Structures are given as C-alpha cells and as structure tokens.
C-alpha cells in the first residue's frame, strides 16, 4: 500500500517544464547534474522561499524512480525508514519541518550516512541555508555543505512574469502582458499565490467561456471574495 507521503511525481514537474531565470539557474543546473546517472555529483541541497521551485526540481530528480518524501506531511520515523530502505536515491523536501524528535533526527542522519557512503543520490531541500535550519542534527547540517548547495530566488518581477507565461503555455493559452501585470499588482508576491490567482482566472474563463483580458481579470477579482481569490 502506498504511503500517503510518497507522492507520485506530477507529470508537469520535470526539467523540461522548469522555468529558469537568473535566480534559479544554478539550482537547475545542479539538479540536472545530480539526476544524471553518469555524473559523479550525488549530493544536493536546495533552499529558498515557498513557491521558488525547490519541490519542482526535487520531483524532477525523483522521476528517476526515487521516492519523494516531504517532512510537512507528518512522516513518522518508521515510515521514513521503510520508504528509503530499498530506494536508490534519497529525496527529502521541507527539512525546516523536521520533527522535534531526537530519534527521528538520528534516523534521518543514519539514512544520510548510508546513502552517502554507498554513493547513492541524495537531494534535499528546505526553506533556509543549512546552518540556519533550526533543530536539524548538527552532523547533518555540516554534511549538507559537502555537496552542491544552491538558493532559488524568484523575487524579481521578470522571473515571476516568466513563470506565469510558462504556466499559461502549459494550458495552451496566451495571456496578454497587461493581465500578467495586473496579477502581479494585485496579488501577493509569493509565486504560489501568483499561480493560484492565475489558475482561478483561467477556471473562470472556462466557466464563463470568455477570453482572458484585462477587463475580465478585473471583473473576476472584483466579483470574488478576497478569502476565496486564491482557492
């Protein structure tokens, strides 16, 4: 029976669908190296704010047949060990959510050691640089610096525009620049929120059978309760 935290890889989460920009290019290149079975690099740590693309890159690496584990999903020590037991790659997301449990932290450290010693792929991600991850085993913190480390930063509007345009292309629609500017102006700067706002607009355009234009985008925002805008 599949564990609830061992998510299937979302088809759109691949290297081909990742939108690169100045703020995430190094992370993208490092992830490609770790995913390449012929490359000697086997250890990667990614960090950055929510919505910056960490999960996308980890899921892209996981397409090689590795289980993807997110610590935000309430993973227990036994589940962690069972999932990683026969895996050829250790993919762990959301290290900032590591449980405040000494046994769990020791288990994670043990897994890291086993995978690193055997030369297997290790790709991890968290919201902060290694030394700023509160509560992580100090041995693991120092080991994260042994491999490739990269920050993802999509805080500039150029990157945000590129990401929204890429998602629109995935939906096979063209979104006018003034609509993208309006979304940026009226929505939280978090990439996840921007994409949620765009997807809400897209669903409304399908339901109403209308083209996405600036007047329509304004109408949708004005007619949608703010609490539901990103739902």
Image: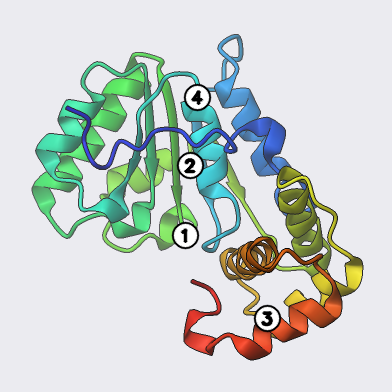
The disc label shown at residue 127, or none: 1
Tell me the mark number nearer the camera, choosing from 3 and 1: 3
Q: In this view, does 157 lie above or below 96?
A: below
Of labels 2 and 3, earlier in sequence is 2
Q: Is residue 165 above or below residue 32?
A: below
Figure quadrant of residue 113: top left
Q: Is residue 166 visible?
A: yes
**Picture coordinates of residue 121 (x, y %)?**
44, 22
Q: How far apart are marks 4 and 1 (CA)?
A: 22 Å
Of labels 4 and 1, earlier in sequence is 4
Tell me the mark number nearer the camera, choosing from 1 and 2: 1
Whether residue 56 sits left or right of residue 154 in the image: it is: left
Element class at badge 3: helix
Of labels 3 and 4, earlier in sequence is 4
Tag 3 near tag 1, CB within 8 Å: no
The disc label shown at residue 220, or none: 3
* Residue located 80% across and 62% down the image: 161
**Picture coordinates of residue 219 (x, y %)?**
73, 85
Q: Distance between the residues labelled 1 and 2?
A: 15 Å
Whether residue 228 sits left or right of residue 116 in the image: it is: right
Mark 2 burial class by Cα count in 10 Å: few <14, some 14-19, many 20+: some
Report the residue marked by disc 4: 63
Element class at badge 2: loop
């Amino acid at each position: 029976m599949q564990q609830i935290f061992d998510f299937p890889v979302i088809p759109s989460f691949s290297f081909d669908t990742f939108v690169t920009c100045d703020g995430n290019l190094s992370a993208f290149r490092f992830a490609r190296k770790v995913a390449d079975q012929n490359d000697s690099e086997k250890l990667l740590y990614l960090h950055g704010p929510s919505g910056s693309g960490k999960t996308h890159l980890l899921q892209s690496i996981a397409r090689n047949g590795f289980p993807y584990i997110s610590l935000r999903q309430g993973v227990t020590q036994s589940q962690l060990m069972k999932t990683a037991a026969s895996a050829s790659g250790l993919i762990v997301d959301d290290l900032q959510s590591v449980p405040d449990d000494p046994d769990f932290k020791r288990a994670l450290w043990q897994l890291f050691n086993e995978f690193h010693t055997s030369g297997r792929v290790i790709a991890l991600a968290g919201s902060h640089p290694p030394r700023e991850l509160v509560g992580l085993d100090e041995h693991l913190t120092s080991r994260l610096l042994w491999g490739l480390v990269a920050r993802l930063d999509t805080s500039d509007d150029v990157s945000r525009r590129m990401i929204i345009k890429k998602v629109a292309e995935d939906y096979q629609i063209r979104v006018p620049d003034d609509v993208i500017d309006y979304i940026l102006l009226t929505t939280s700067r978090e990439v996840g929120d921007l994409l949620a706002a765009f997807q809400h607009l897209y669903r409304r355009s399908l339901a109403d059978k209308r083209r996405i234009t600036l007047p329509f985008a304004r109408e949708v925002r004005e007619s949608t309760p703010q609490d539901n805008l990103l739902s």
